[in-house]
Image (spheres, rainbow, N blue to C red):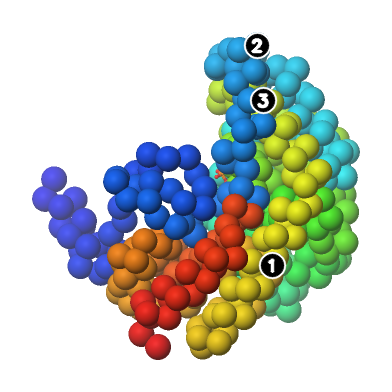
Amino acid sequence: MDDLAAKLDARRAQGLYRQRQTLSSPQGARVTVGDETLLSFCSNDYLGLANDPRIVRAFCEAATEHGVGAGASHLITGHNAVHGALEEELAEFVGAPRALLFSTGYMANLGVVTAFADRHGVICEDKLNHASLIDAARLARAEVRRYPHVDTGRLDEILAAARGAKLITTDGVFSMDGDVAPLSELRELAQRYGARLLVDDAHGLGVLGSEGRGSCADQGIAIAAPLILMGTLGKAFGVFGAFVAAEEAIIETLIQYARTYIYTTALPPAVAAAVRESLHIVRAEPWRREHLQTLIRRFVEGAQTLGLRLTNTKTPIQPVLLGDSEVALAASQRLRARGILVPAIRPPTVPVGTSRLRITFSAAHQAADVDQLLEGLATALPL
Ligand SMILES: *Cc1c(COP(=O)(O)O)cnc(C)c1O
């Protein structure tokens, strides 16, 4: 046990120790932590749907009808008509022939990557890909080549030299920087070298593109070979779960071979029912995306006036780059003392020397909330 204590102490000393906040309220612009109510810029609930009464009602009604647990994996008896209906609606939404539900985005990425890459192939990863894509590549035991962030020139060279089956994986919207992948160039490279392209659109779906169809729609890219889309349902959709959208043969292959699909309990049908309601709202209420864009513009203008270092993006992920982890942690703590919750993101989640405050906006925020955040930043940061 001494070795563990020493390891934990070292992490503390580096300013990298992680602790959970325990909420006693639902997710929202304001959350309750202990006996404090804090203005929160931490969630991935981009459209403010995590506590929407219509979705809560759909969830409760479906639980009454279908019970609480799916009771089995999809391939045994866990697959319910509600799952099937949601898969059809998601496929139609993103414009793909088929969609397949997974329990989480993490598992969906593991499932796709291990189904389409093996020891004889090569996986090309953007350096800033989400941890689940990195872990997926390790699990596939393929040769992994990581290219510098959005550097398609370097990717071109790697693909030219690669042997065996090739898979390119990328976030659609990068989770810690909020910038977007150059999808049309990536698809072009995939086509040229006969590679598959997995786009993880956890942060683009619901937020970008017409009706919130995501990064691909926003960049005019169809969900067709060589592209495979992974979308999550616990972020802008405000619920839980994930799906993969692609053509028939890809989906059937996943059903046969994706171990994270086969060997796990199906999502509760009530969760699927809640997502169906959420999907309806995501499409029918464009004001949520418009309001979110207004908030983001207000923040970017204010932050520029303060001279803060941002990444150049119109997504709701707006990091303030600070560099040193102690500095980021101190800034987060000073904001917290002013009733504002913004996480400090430190290595190993981001590269050493790029610690930051990761601010995320939600349609649940008001303009006055953005102003309060800017005031907080003006006093909390060493400018
Ligand atoms: C959140 C996230 C995931 C994981 O999705 P879960 O459904 O939360 O497991 C995968 N990829 C990216 C880019 C994410 O941000």
Looking at the picture, tell me which residue is in the foreground, 124 or 44: 44
Disc 1 designates what residue?
A: 294
Mark found first going from the N terminus, 1 or 2? 2
Residue at the far front: name it.
Answer: 368
Q: What amino acid type is highlighted by mark number 3?
A: Ala
Precedes in sequence: disc 3 or disc 2: 3
- Residue 88 appears in the picture as rendered: yes
The residue pinned by badge 2 equals 65
Q: Secondary structure at mark 3?
A: helix
Please state which amino acid type lies under the numbered disc 2: Glu
Tell me if residue 314 comes above or below residue 2 in the rendering. Answer: below
Residue tagged by mark 3?
58
Mark seen at residue 57: none
Q: 116 or 37, which is in the foreground?
A: 37
Q: Nearer the viewer, mark 3 or mark 2?
A: 3
Q: Disc 3 versus disc 1: distance between alpha carbons?
A: 30 Å
